[in-house]
């Protein structure tokens, strides 16, 4: 299973949105020809209708099928309602080539912190399995080089326990704009950087992931330099 993972587009009229980086990212992803593209939220900056319309049109250029969940910026100004209008359900299960892709909505309206919540965790309990790839916007484990940790997922402990008990091989997230990979017991937790936002000091990037039965290979791909940093994890 070959997965492209992109996050934190922050489509807007702001100078901090780098349209050329988004266009280059999509072109590079198309060259990779992944089986699936996972988009882990903050596709807009303010949750406005014009932003959802604009980013939807850009994402239509992706040639592989994609799955998408909202981030905290997408839930601003009742953007969580617009998200469902433009992209469908905020949390869902999609079976692809023997894997269950489980998208979670970790956003809360008009606040930055993330939460899965008791109702969604109970729903997750009924769907999760060792063949699951779980993806959400907020990070489950603190990310280095991002300053003081203020908005990690507030129920990260309960979520991590469930992932561990069900031997989930791969979890994908975004939010902090800094790419990183952790191994938590036998789960690979990969956080993507930002594709097209200038808000932080990190270079714009996306991930290419090869998921095998006993191995996960994550490549962090710089959009500007085309450099790749590879992480190979045995699970």
Image (spheres, rainbow, N blue to C red):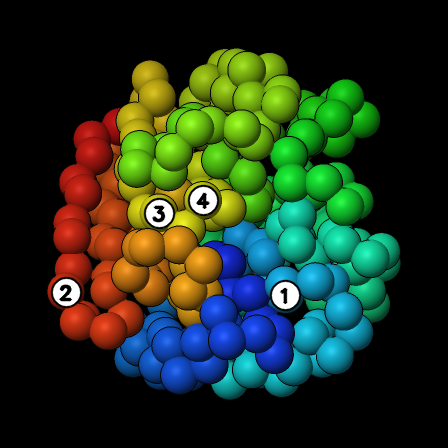
Q: How dense is the environment of label 4, judged by Cα within 10 Å: few (below 14), some, or many (20 and up)?
A: many
Q: Which residue is mark 2?
A: 227
Q: State how far apart marks 2 and 3 are (Cα).
A: 15 Å
Q: Which residue is mark 3?
A: 178
Q: First in sequence: mark 2 or mark 1?
A: 1
Q: Which residue is mark 1?
A: 44
Callouts 2 and 1 close, C-beta under 8 Å: no
Q: First in sequence: mark 1 or mark 4?
A: 1
Q: Nearer the viewer, residue 12 or 101?
A: 12
In front: label 2 or label 1: 1
| Residue 181 in the figure: left or right of residue 148 | left
Could you tell me which quadrant the C terminus lies in? top left
Q: State how far apart marks 2 and 1 are (Cα).
A: 26 Å
Q: First in sequence: mark 2 or mark 4?
A: 4
Q: For residue 108, which quarter of the picture? A: top right
Q: In the rendered picture of this protein, how many numbered marks are placed on residues?
A: 4
Q: First in sequence: mark 3 or mark 1?
A: 1
Q: Nearer the viewer, residue 206 or 78?
A: 78
Asked if residue 206 shows in the view, the reply is yes
Q: For residue 2, which quarter of the picture? A: bottom left
| Residue 221 in the figure: left or right of residue 173 | left
The relative height of residue 2 versus residue 127 in the rendered view (above or below) is below
Q: How dense is the environment of label 2, judged by Cα within 10 Å: few (below 14), some, or many (20 and up)?
A: few
Q: State how far apart marks 3 and 4 are (Cα).
A: 5 Å
In front: label 2 or label 4: 4
């Amino acid at each position: 299973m070959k997965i492209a993972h992109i996050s934190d587009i922050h489509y807007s009229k702001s100078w901090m949105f780098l349209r050329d980086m988004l266009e280059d990212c999509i072109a590079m992803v198309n060259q990779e020809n992944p089986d699936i593209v996972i988009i882990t939220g903050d596709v807009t900056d303010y949750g406005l209708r014009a932003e959802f319309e604009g980013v939807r049109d850009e994402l239509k250029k992706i040639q592989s099928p994609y799955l998408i969940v909202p981030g905290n910026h997408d839930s601003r100004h009742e953007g969580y309602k617009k998200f469902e209008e433009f992209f469908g359900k905020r949390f869902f299960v999609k079976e692809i080539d023997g894997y269950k892709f489980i998208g979670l909505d970790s956003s809360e309206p008009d606040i930055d912190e993330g939460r899965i919540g008791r109702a969604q965790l109970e729903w997750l309990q009924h769907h999760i399995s060792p063949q699951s790839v779980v993806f959400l916007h907020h990070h489950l484990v603190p990310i280095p080089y991002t300053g003081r940790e203020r908005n990690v997922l507030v129920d990260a402990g309960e979520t991590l326990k469930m992932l561990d008990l069900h031997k989930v091989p791969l979890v994908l997230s975004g939010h902090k704009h800094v790419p990183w990979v952790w191994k938590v017991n036998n789960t690979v937790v990969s956080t993507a950087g930002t594709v097209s936002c200038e808000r932080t000091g990190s270079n714009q990037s996306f991930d290419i992931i090869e998921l095998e039965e006993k191995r996960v290979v994550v490549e962090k791909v710089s959009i500007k330099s085309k450099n790749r940093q590879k992480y190979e994890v045995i699970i």
